[in-house]
Amino acid sequence: MDLTDFPSTLWLFLTLSAPALLLGFALAGIIRSFLNPDKVAKWLGRGKASDILIASAVGVPLPLCSCSVIPTAIAIKQKGASRAATSAFLISTPESGIDSILVTKAMMDWPMTIIRPLAAFCSAFLAGFLQMLLNPEEKKFIAKSQASAESCCAKTTSAPHVHHTPTSPNASFAEKIKNGLVWSINDLVDDLALWMTIGLFVGAILQFAIPADFFLGFGLWPSRLLCLLVGIPLYICASATTPIAASLVMKGLSPGAALILLLAGPATNVTNLAVLRPHLGNKGIAINVFSIALVAVLFAIGVDAYYGTQMPAWSINQHLHHHETTAWWEHLSALILVTFLARGLWREEIKPRLTKPKKDCCHP
């Protein structure tokens, strides 16, 4: 193993993911500008069973990660949304997003690009349906404070930073596009900078250091259960899981097990479950985790049956074996992405620690 080859492997990951990520960031900003959380709260506060369907569908393209979705979901709950609709929104939103969908297409293939958001929708809908049946609303709901004393995650997410003025409801079409792009380039990129950087580095390290047949001896069910056990308590954003999952498949992990990681990793983590417990109850938390796990495993079985025993011909495999054909605009996109990520790391992770140290459980 020649360590001098690692930078080229990392750069290949950047050139492959950068165009899709940059386009995803832009589209995410535009979507958020026209589909802001206040509109979502109004749609889900009607107290109807159809709210579950709307929450599951609306959450799929929205660009909110597992930490940033918490204050939005709690606000929706306090404005009158049911536990069922809130649970559906809490699952489909972090599991999928326009940015992660595009990165999935860049690194994997069309079937996985379609299956991933579809599985997110199904797990969200199942959770909402089970909440409605098994965990109905209390007769007297007392809204809990969003900033619970025991959770630093709630503190940091209850008043998220913004680098620009929110879009006015009366803004013109052009102003909404502009404000959406500004939000994306600043807030969204900054929020995802740490985990996107980790995801790209880990994916490149796995591709570089792990033998090609490393996971072949694990078997389907042990690998699926391992991904489930690792994914549920830990946190990594939807876009950042993609290069990791793609690399693991190239080392012998089944595509179905990789899908479990793609679904369970962004949807849950121990801290967020603790923050949500006062709002959903212990039964509600159990229902959400059960729904995510069940749908992930069922889809994993179907995905493995679809791909069979052969390694899928994913884009990452073709890119790594034909990197000499990388276009100039892919290199330029990688440079832009590195610049954005470096700025986000400075503003979110480095500068705050230099000025005023604070504990942040969402960004350890």
Image: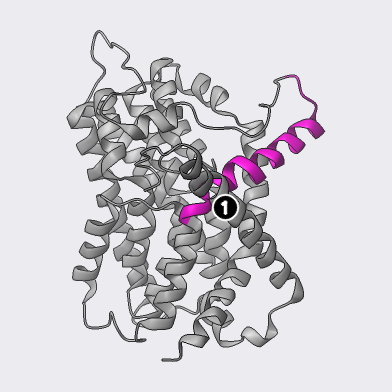
Q: Examine the structure image and report whether residue 311 is included in the region drawn in magenta.
A: no
Where residue 239 appears, x then y in whole percent? 49, 56
> What is the basis of the colouring in this image?
one colour
Point 68% across, 80% down: residue: 326
Point 62% across, 84% down: residue: 323
Point 23% across, 14% down: residue: 138
Q: Nearer the viewer, residue 51 or 293?
A: 293
349 vs 235, left or right, is right
Q: Main secondary structure of the magenta part?
A: helix
273 vs 41, left or right, is left
Where residue 198 appears, x then y in whole percent? 45, 61
Q: Nearer the viewer, residue 221 or 175?
A: 175
Q: Amino acid at mark 1?
A: Asp
Where residue 327 appears, x then y in whole percent? 73, 77
Q: Is residue 311 above or below residue 176?
A: below
169 vs 349, left or right, is right
In the rendered image, is residue 11 in sight? yes
Q: Secondary structure at mark 1?
A: helix
Q: Which residues are magenta?
A: 170-195
56 vs 84, left or right, is right
Q: Examine the structure image and report whether residue 193 is included in the region drawn in magenta.
A: yes
Where residue 135 appears, x then y in whole percent? 22, 26
Residue farthest toward the bottom in the current orientation of the protein: 1
In the rendered image, is residue 52 in sight? no
Q: Nearer the viewer, residue 26 or 288?
A: 26
Residue farthest toward the front in the current orientation of the protein: 355
- Location of residue 11 by image quarter: bottom right
Q: How many marks?
A: 1
Q: Is residue 295 above or below residue 1?
A: above
The residue to which callout 1 is attached is 99
Q: Is residue 192 above or below residue 10?
A: above
Q: Quadrant of the N terminus?
A: bottom left
